Amino acid sequence: MERRGVDIRMFDYSNEFLWGDKWSVENNIAWFVSGSNNILFCVNMVTNQYRIVEPLPGKFQGGFRLNSNCIKSDNVIFCMPDIGSCIWYYDLFNNKFQKIEIENPNHLRIGVVDFWKCGDILWAVSSGLKQIIEINLSKKFVVRYYNITNSNEEIIARSIKSGNCIYVASALKGRIYEFNIETKNIMINDLPTIEGGLHTISVCKGKFWLSGYDKNIYIWEKDKNIVEISNHFPSNFGIYNFDRKASKFLNCDVVKYHTPTFLESIHVGDYMWFIPFQTNHILYVNTDTYKINVFEIKEEEEIENGRRREMNCKYVLQYIYKNRYIGLYSLKNEIVLEIDSKTFEIKKRRISLEEDSLKKIFPEWIFRENINAECSLYKKLLKKDIKYESRKETKGIKIYNYVCL
């Protein structure tokens, strides 16, 4: 087993960057929606400057993951709903947000995380609605909804598009739903040897790479319906007890988990990369030999009395850049770490808010003292002598500002 590791202790942890989920990267410009306060930002990947574009309509403060995944099509940014109730799209010509309504009579969490542009159509998988949504990008409306399953008990996990089909993993069993975007037919693939549910799914060289809730990586050869298992995990691979409910803070003995083993599995460069959810190591796997290797970041090791974080997970996958660089937001250190999948080097991508955007910070923005990025932004406002006042003169906000800021 190969181990590659870096020590990021030399990095300066001052950070004024806010995390977001799936970025849309076009050439050297990236677009993302902040996961914690629902603002559309634009990042220049060369200068490492980012700017405020516009807050999404509706709830701002406390708008956690409302529409935190986005994709750019021509001159329009489509912001997909997770906890949000509709698709918001921003026109870069008229600088306005408009919305595409989503049918959701039972008010479920829509949960659109995976989506793909195919010509003028955007195909999106809704885990909450258990549907595939066909969206016309130029006319900006939903064409049709397609049921993945009618089972009330089924839980939808992650999805991948390969060729003319969308493959959707089941979180309850070794099952893959296969939707053909041309015929609109759906087929069920029940996979052998997989006992538990699945979470991530990727494809490489005609084979599907899957992970679930245990110390197994599954490689599914669809044509033969054969599943191979790679389980030679490092001996010190374990899961962190972030909720403090177990006796061990890092448990390397247990082999089945209540949470997904990996947050993401992605094919970048010559390897399949597995990004931890609450487990302790990033793994990269040779797609020919299935050999599992460890990518260690020493400063990402957790300690039991660590500081409070926004989410009980290790990373948020921000972007894949030039099919080479993997951008991860560290929830522990509140920085963007960028892995070079060819050289196995890692760097902190220092992203700062451009000064003109400081003047666009609006009164509804209440900075939180326990989030480093927001403290850094507030200090930058003070340093630039930009007056920041809240228009809402409630007693609660006065107390918040006095105590926290």
Image: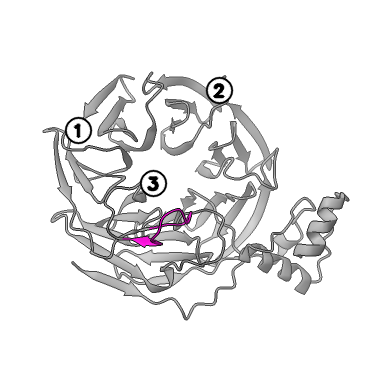
Amino acid type, callout 3: Thr
Amino acid type, callout 2: Asn
Return the disc, 2 or 3, that comes first in the chain's sequence.
2
Q: How many marks?
A: 3
Closer to the camera, 276 or 248? 248
Q: Residues within 10 Å of mark 1 (few under 14, many from 20)?
A: some
Q: Is residue 385 left or right of residue 373?
A: right
- 97 to 405, vertically: above or below: above
Residue, x 59% and y 73% (percent of image)?
14
Residue 332: % across, % down: 50, 64
Find disc 1 in the rendering and name its residue.
Answer: 191
Secondary structure of the residue carrying numbered label 1:
loop
Residue, x 25% and y 34% (percent of image)?
174
Residue, x 38% and y 18% (percent of image)?
150
The answer to if 249 sits in the magenta stretch is yes
Quadrant placement of the C terminus: bottom right
Instruction: Report the mark closest to the observer, 2 or 1.
Output: 1
Find disc 2 in the rendering and name its residue.
Answer: 104
Residue 17: % across, % down: 59, 62
Amino acid type, callout 1: Leu
The answer to if 175 sits in the magenta stretch is no
Q: Residues within 10 Å of mark 3 (few under 14, many from 20)?
A: some
In magenta, the rendered stretch is 240-251
Q: Is residue 137 left or right of residue 256?
A: right
